[in-house]
Image (spheres, helix red, strand yellow):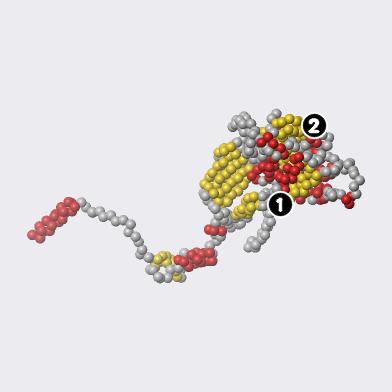
Amino acid sequence: PTFHPVEVGEEAELRFKLSHAGANVVELSVDPGPEELTLRNNRTALMVNGVRDRLRVLLVSGEPHPGERTWRNLLKADPGVDMVHFTILRPPEKQDGTPVDELSLISFPTRELFSIKLHEFDLIIFDRYKRRGVLPFTYFDNIANYVDQGGALLVAAGPAFASGESLYRTPLAIVFPAQPTGRIRTGGFRPQLTDLGARHPVTETLPGANSFADDGGALDPPRWGRWFRFIETEQLDGKMLLSAPDGAPLLLLDEVGEGRVAQLLSDHSWLWARGFDGGGPQAELLRRLAHWLMKEPDLEEENLYAEYEAGEILIERRSVNLSDVPVLVEFPDGHSQLVEMMPVTPGKWRAQIEAQQPGIYHLRDGRRSTIVAAGDANPVEFADVRATENQLAPVVAASGGAAVWLRADGVPDIRRVGPGRDMAGQGWVGLRENRQYLVAALEQHSLLPALLMLLLIAAAIGFAWRSEGR
């Protein structure tokens, strides 16, 4: 939480930074005062939809290859992406005699991009890049710091990643989740989801993927096209989502400091885009990778989400760890309740509870927390609970009564008054006698049985006659 001093009774403009695009719930609260009547009006919630203006991407390519065009087409097809493409068409050691003023290419502003304006990019992609003396180690060190401070890096490795010109032999090695063994594996194979990849939101519903049984056993093989080359590596850290049939890593994700890194250890994903051997979901996979690197909530492997709808609070919890953890719900009045979650799919649980009262609900599962506003987070009746003449004036005017302050005037007398008479005076208030009622039902019962009544009447007459006769 962040703290902002605000003067009571004064308007203030608060600035805050949204952590991600999409729906963001912002809670505003103040500390309890010395004479609070209720704490229900000390907080409110705002739903703010964050929109990423433009996604700035720096694409760094090595030597031209068939997949390079696929990267460009994919990024340029999105109108929300600003792409800067840095590619090496001629290494520094290769010279020709063409005068500089006759060259169609300009010198690339490497210092400006990799030093001065590096942190202006949201995502950096290295596509089959290898060290050729173009970028000094200082720039790679800048990129490693950029990732540690919250940047995003995607590396699509080619054959050079297994050589002495590998990016792993730069300061970037400290952010990579896998190191090359020096071997390049060739031959047709179909990438397959790992058990973790089948639960991770980046890869779990990719069309054509292999499936798993509830016990983790394989059910159906992948139905997408084959690749023919990948770089053999040793996994050091991170999460493996795609693998070769023998279990070798193909796609690794990792969180480094405040930033994120993705390693794609094959340069043949473009075969999916070309439809070779049936093709595959390359565009969808890369789109999800980019959004995960941008920390989009929908692609978080550990996430807690709540939504209010039609008097109910819908809770969804996602975790790649198959642990069934209850969610603690704190109600607006302060009391808490543990909610047991029901499994939906491996790694996903849901529950539903009744929103018993309007206000802000806090939810926690031990690692993640979220808030949701049910109805009006700050109802009108709790907005200002002070009893003042201004607050009560509409009610007093509508009823024709009066406002009497017990502290100043004492307890007034209560008098019955007729319709149209004054309802209040000095030291008294009236209770109108409207004489309005409605007969809803009528029941009649005899005081005594009829035969007994006849006998009593006859006895009374006889007694009277006898007395009169005397």
Residue 25's disc number: none
Residue 325 visible, this orientation: no
Give coordinates of residue 261: x percent, y percent.
73, 41
Residue named by callout 2: 182
Query: Mark 2 Cα within 10 Å, few/some/many (few <14, many 20+)?
Result: some
Q: CA distance from mark 2 to mark 1?
A: 38 Å
Of 428 and 62, the residue lying toward us: 62
Q: Is residue 343 above or below residue 388?
A: above
Three-letter amino acid code of the residue under disc 1: Arg
Q: Quadrant of the C terminus?
A: bottom left
Element class at badge 1: loop
Label 2 vs 1, first from the N-terminus: 1
Q: Is residue 54 above or below residue 190?
A: below
Using residue 58 as the reference point, say whether residue 326 is left or right of it: left
Give coordinates of residue 364: x percent, y percent.
61, 44
Of 62 and 291, the residue lying toward us: 62
Three-letter amino acid code of the residue under disc 2: Gly
Residue 61 visible, this orientation: yes
- Residue at the (72%, 45%) spot, across then down: 73
- Residue at the (89%, 41%) spot, across then down: 93
Give coordinates of residue 167: x percent, y percent.
80, 38
Using residue 317 as the reference point, say whether residue 250 is left or right of it: right
Query: Mark 1 Cα within 10 Å, few/some/many (few <14, many 20+)?
Result: few
Element class at badge 2: strand
- Total labels: the figure holds 2
- Residue at the (69%, 56%) spot, across then down: 15
Using residue 409 as the reference point, say whether residue 290 is left or right of it: right
Give coordinates of residue 227: x percent, y percent.
71, 34
Residue 54's disc number: 1
Q: Is residue 317 above or below residue 376?
A: above
Q: Quadrant of residue 166?
A: top right
